[in-house]
């Protein structure tokens, strides 16, 4: 019997969120004056998977951006590539472009006999600002290996080379690998993909709801041991510095709250699953990543997560004249 076919790709919706005005998730406070607001939507799932808290329209489709990477990595495993440890964590990463990230990408390319020129992610600078300054000061230029999605692209190329699938079209939504990833996303989210677009790295990007995204992370964190989903989750949790970097909230949270699975995405998307089965996902409507920390910290507090890392993630000071004069704070 032929494999089930994914639904026909539909054009992306004109708006990622409902036309209803979303609630304020964060405020920008300068010198005691609220000078700006970040709106969005947020969902929290209880341990049994039921919706415990919903702010805004959490059923409207959004592009999870890099929060989809665990599902993409699981699709690579299901397609037959044997990855584990740091290599699997890097396959699900939005890495900071630190030397250890770049070194492992190059090592993986060499292990599978792949030329870095085969990578179809765009040349870029390190994602981490401190690392970017160091990189430029050393005379380096934008490079595909340095781009934060290079680990994912390397894993995609590796499984295509192993299976004898076309390398030059590995990002085509109709490529066998991308069709497998499409099915993984739908199974994990428990809903059909609403639209397929193109991510910043060039890979196909599947739209699902925030409820679906939280459901997917919950499914990965609690999947059966040995399954592709659980292998990805375990690798990310064991090697969080390869998922993000040494100065990133995802790394801090997975390292300091054992069993937690966490992944951000561009345009201010975040998903987290806790070891007890609870999960959350949110998107800040205007894409302001500066609001990610305060919103995430507040959501974790509502979930009863008690750890110094929560305050560390949530602290986002505003400066005036070189000194702290305000903050970005959660508003729910």
Image: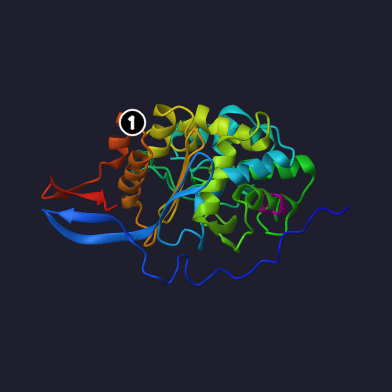
Residue, x 51% and y 53% (percent of image)? 211
Residue 271 is situated, as x and y percent measured from the top left of the image, at 47, 46
Residue, x 57% and y 30% (percent of image)? 234
Residue, x 62% and y 56% (percent of image)? 191
Q: Nearer the viewer, residue 128 or 262?
A: 262
Q: Label 1: how many residues lie within 10 Å, few (<14), some (14-19) or many (20+)?
A: few
Q: Is residue 271 visible?
A: no
Residue 160 is situated, as x and y percent measured from the top left of the image, at 73, 45
Q: Secondary structure at mark 1?
A: loop
**Is 180 a magenta residue?**
yes
**Is 294 a magenta residue?**
no
Position above or below: 23 against 295: below
Residue, x 15% and y 54% (percent of image)? 30
Q: Nearer the viewer, residue 263 or 276?
A: 276
Say how the picture is coloured.
rainbow
Q: Is residue 330 left or right of residue 268?
A: left
Magenta extent: 178-182
Name the residue carrying label 1: 306
Residue 132 is situated, as x and y percent measured from the top left of the image, at 37, 43
Q: How many marks?
A: 1
Q: Is residue 46 visible?
A: yes
Name the dominant secondary structure of the magenta segment. helix
Q: Is residue 312 left or right of residue 118?
A: left
């Amino acid at each position: 019997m032929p494999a089930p076919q994914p639904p026909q790709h539909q054009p992306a919706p004109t708006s990622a969120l409902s036309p209803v005005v979303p609630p304020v998730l964060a405020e920008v406070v300068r010198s005691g004056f609220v000078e700006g607001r970040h709106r969005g939507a947020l969902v929290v799932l209880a341990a049994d998977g039921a919706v415990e808290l919903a702010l805004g329209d959490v059923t409207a489709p959004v592009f999870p951006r890099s929060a989809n990477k665990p599902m993409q990595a699981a699709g690579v495993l299901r397609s037959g590539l044997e990855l584990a440890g740091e290599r699997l964590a890097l396959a699900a990463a939005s890495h900071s472009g630190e030397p250890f990230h770049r070194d492992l990408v190059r090592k993986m390319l060499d292990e599978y006999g792949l030329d870095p020129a085969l990578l179809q992610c765009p040349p870029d600078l390190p994602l981490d600002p401190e690392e970017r300054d160091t990189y430029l000061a050393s005379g380096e230029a934008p490079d595909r290996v340095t781009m934060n999605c290079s680990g994912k692209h390397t894993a995609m190329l590796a499984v295509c080379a192993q299976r004898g699938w076309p390398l030059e079209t590995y990002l085509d939504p109709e490529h066998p690998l991308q069709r497998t990833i499409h099915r993984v996303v739908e199974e994990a989210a428990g809903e059909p993909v609403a639209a397929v677009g193109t991510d910043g790295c060039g890979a196909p990007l599947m739209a699902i709801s925030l409820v679906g995204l939280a459901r997917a992370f919950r499914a990965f964190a609690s999947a059966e041991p040995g399954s592709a989903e659980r292998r990805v989750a375990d690798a990310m949790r064991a090697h969080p510095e390869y998922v993000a970097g040494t100065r990133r909230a995802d790394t801090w949270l997975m390292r300091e709250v054992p069993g937690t699975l966490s992944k951000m995405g561009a345009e201010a998307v975040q998903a987290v699953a806790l070891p007890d089965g609870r999960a959350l996902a949110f998107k800040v409507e205007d894409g302001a990543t500066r609001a990610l920390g305060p919103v995430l910290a507040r959501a974790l507090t509502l979930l009863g997560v008690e750890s110094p890392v929560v305050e560390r993630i949530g602290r986002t000071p505003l400066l005036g004249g070189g000194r702290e004069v305000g903050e970005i704070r959660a508003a729910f």
